Image (spheres, rainbow, N blue to C red):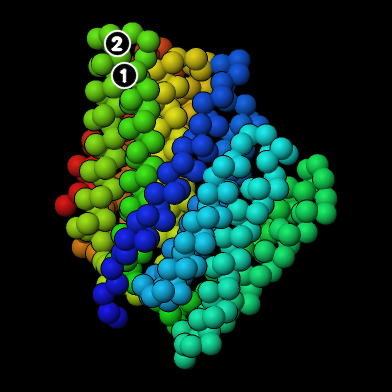
Amino acid sequence: MHEKKVTWLELFYDLLFVAAISKATHVLLHVEHGTISAEHLSKFVLIFIPIWWAWVGQTVYNNRFGRDLSLHRVFMILQLFFVLIMTASLNVDFDAYYIPFFVGYIGSRVLTAVQYVITQKVEVGGRRDTARFFGTYFWLGIAISAFSLFFDSWVRYAILYAGIAIDILVPLIGRKHLVKTPVHTAHLLERFALFTLILLGESVISMLSVLQSDELTVSSILFAAMAFVLVIGIWWQYFENVEKNVDKAKRTAGQTIMYGHLFIYLSLSMIAASIQLLFLNQLEYLFMLGFIFGSVLLYFGSVMFVLYAYRFEHLKPKLSVILSLLGLLGALFALDLFITASPHVILGEIMLFFIVFAKATHR
């Protein structure tokens, strides 16, 4: 399989998702009575998933069939326009912004589906079968979501997300077609890693929010310094593994990378929000512990799932290492349950965990 490189247009495409990710993360900063309400937690997920899937849909097409030609560039640029519309409409008040959100998201998905229809006419063999499958069945989810325009209230959203769910399930249902056209693993890992950088950027924004507080104090500087080390720990753990410890020549359908990264991205947004919420100290203590440690546990489980599947066999961490890391995280959580810890201490514990995590999984 020939080497596939990330294009400048793909990098520009990623940049437009920065604002979308920022808006989704901001939903988690709505604190009411010491907690993040179930409504805002669910809206965070419901906003995040279409962003992720719109990006994944075009990214995976580019990985298998994309060529840096004029027609492909036109489709990418048109996608950027619809991404802008979708991003501008992201709001916790779904009703007021439903139509522009629908236009932005569905417009993006339609363009991806059309590319598959065009591609199936010029490809042969297994590649044609793969393009035909997506060019046929992606329309099913799009059509179901389109029916939401004829309804109101919660029914509208149920139909919209039913279509999105079916859209997301299509690659899983058609796995037998995908294995005929394996992904360019190196390129796909690089694309998802670049998007991971966007999520880490949210943590950097959280650090800036701390440093730009009303009064810069020794306490805020120390908190920002620990948050900085935490971000470096996450960067070290993720990127050292992606760069040095995974088999980029592995031929797969790429689904572990695609779906596993949804949970990596969700957890990174939650960790970014946790930094600000810890500093503001507005959350009820037990909720704060559950949210922060739950975010870290979600990251740990999802990143191990993805990287473990692609690591060279001789570099895969032993079960004892995985259990030890889980034990450390659990011990820190239990300690904070029995001894009320300050926000600085909790952040320091998470920082320590990621340093140990990075060290234990890097070889």
Q: Give the answer, above or below, for where 246 lies relative to 43.
A: below
Residue shown at 33% from the left, 8% from the top: 215
Closer to the camera in the image, 137 or 303: 137
Labels 1 and 2 touching (C-beta < 8 A): yes
**Hey, what amino acid is under mark 2?**
Leu
Residue 7 is left or right of residue 168, and the answer is: left
Residue 351 falls in which quadrant of the image? Answer: top left
Q: CA distance from mark 1 to mark 2?
A: 6 Å
Hey, which residue is sitting farthest left in the picture? 363
Residue 100 is left or right of residue 3, and the answer is: right
Label 1 element class: helix
Residue shown at 34% from the left, 40% from the top: 200
Q: Which mark is residue 211?
A: 1
Q: Give the answer, above or below, for where 227 lies relative to 184.
A: above
Kindly identify which residue carries mark 2: 216
Q: Give the answer, above or below, for where 134 lies relative to 233.
A: below
